[in-house]
Structures are given as structure tokens and as C-alpha cells.
Amino acid sequence: MSLLNFLRLQEIDSSFDDVSDESRLRDDDIELNDQFDEDSLESYWDQVVQDIHEDPEWFNFNHQ
């Protein structure tokens, strides 16, 4: 018998809640119109890959 059948969610204790009700109701709009520099992103990602390959604990899972 699984113990998961007996798990129940606990009620949220609002006495420790630091967030006001107003901020919960307010929608946070996210603007996704920002342009990004493709060259700098590519350069950054190349550096990340290089750092991974230089990590002594890195393991290449492609080798068989």
C-alpha cells in the first residue's frame, strides 16, 4: 500500500504572509519586446561551452 494515498495538503497559515492582498491581485505584465545582441549571446554561450569542456570533472556522455 502506498503512503501517497494518505498525504493531504495543509492549509496555508496567512499569519506569516508578508505579501499583501493587493499585490496578489495585481497583474505583473512582462514585456518580451527587448532586443538582444545575437553576437554577444553567441559569444557568451561559446564561453560557457568552453568552460564546461575545461572543467576537470566534466564528462562527455557521447563517448562510448
Image (cartoon, helix red, strand yellow):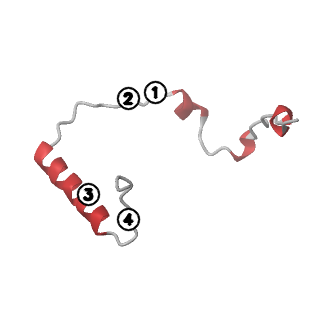
Q: Residues within 10 Å of mark 3 (few under 14, many from 20)?
A: few
Q: Amino acid at mark 4?
A: Trp
- Report the residue that reaches farthest toward the bottom: 56
Mark 4 or mark 1: name the one nearer the start of the chain: 1
Hey, which residue is sitting farthest front in the picture? 64
> Looking at the rendered structure, which numbered label has been put on residue 42?
none
- Classify residue 10 by image quadrant: top right
Across and down, in percent, residue 41 comes to: 19, 48
Identify the secondary structure beneath mark 4: loop
Q: Which residue is mark 2?
A: 29
Mark 2 or mark 3, which has the lower sequence index?
A: 2
Mark 2 and mark 1: Cα distance apart in space: 6 Å
Q: Amino acid at mark 2?
A: Asp
Query: How far across and down, in percent of the image, does residue 51 sit?
Result: 27, 65
The residue singled out by tag 4 in the image is 58
Other-residue count near label 4 (Cα within 10 Å), few / some / many at <14 / 14–19 / ≥20: few
The residue that label 1 is drawn on is 27
How far separated are the C-alphas under marks 1 and 3? 37 Å
